[in-house]
Amino acid sequence: MCPCCGSPLIIIEWEGIEVDYCPACGGTWLDAGELELIAERSGADLGRLRHAIRHARGHSKLSRRCPRCRRKMERIDVGEDQQKPIELDRCPRGHGLWFDRGEMDSLIDRYEEGEEGAMARFFGNLYRHERESKRKDTKMAVNLGLIGFVVIIGLLVLLIIWVIATYNGLVRLRNMVREAWAQIDVQLKRRHDLIPNLVEAVKGYAGHERSTLDEVIKARSQAVAAHGPVEQAQAEQALSGALGRLMLLVEQYPNLKANENFMALQEELTSTENKIGSRGNITTIQ
């Protein structure tokens, strides 16, 4: 964790050297010996800086803690002669140094010797490498976010299409049911209109079969007065049963069966019932 702001430290690497860096506050942690290793890799002469750090004066304990041992670090003044000292944070156990943003640059400007700017170029390359990695990570995160957004939009579009298609299908099904019921209602009305004529034709030959004829008339009246699919289906079933018993009665009267008026009515009634059946069994429609 960063001793300054508490954010997680990240490791940035350049030419085989790893440095702990805080992307939140810009601070840098160097383990013991890393400063010498960086000077060696960069070709910089940091003899004066090493001497200044070795003889730096500690003047206070801080609340900041070493990232390695978690002990409180001490504040040291790094400077020579009459120069204004540069304050750094040092682990009391010698685990390393903490540089706030800008402190590293100040030390390099004051103490670097040898090849001009070698140390500064090294840290410049180090931080530039970190920034480029961060930009790549940001770009990848943006791309992944864009892909996720496109996927979500695609799923929403598919969901909307499915909802619309399902709704249209249900509307078509509802219209088909309504149309089927309208056609059935027409045929049922025609059936109800034929039954009184059929009963009158039977009366001329079997008037004494009063109970059977009254049963048909009663069943017809109930069917005409029925409301709703369930009640109408039950009434039509009862009417069909009464008509069935009437047809059995007709079988006992050959003269009636041969009557042209009765035959025409029976044929028309049979045709109407067949049309009702072709629209679907009314007892199954809810």
Image (cartoon, grey):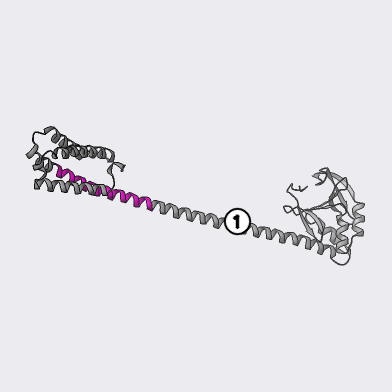
Residue drawn 61% across and 57% down? 144
Residue drawn 18% across and 39% down? 243
Q: Is 50 colored magenta in this rendering?
A: no
Can you say whether 132 is above or below 202 in the image?
A: below
User: Residue 240: x and y, percent?
Assistant: 21, 40
User: Residue 273: x and y, percent?
Assistant: 21, 46
Residue extent of the magenta highlight = 168-195
281 relative to 140 in the view: left or right = left
User: Residue 43: x and y, percent?
Assistant: 88, 64
Give the prevailing secondary structure in the magenta stretch.
helix
Can you say whether 42 is above or below 213 in the image?
A: below
Q: Is residue 227 visible?
A: no
Per the image, the residue denoted by label 1 is: 145
Nearer to the camera, 16 or 2: 16
Nearer to the camera, 189 or 7: 189
Q: Residues within 10 Å of mark 1 (few under 14, many from 20)?
A: few
User: Residue 35: x and y, percent?
Assistant: 86, 56
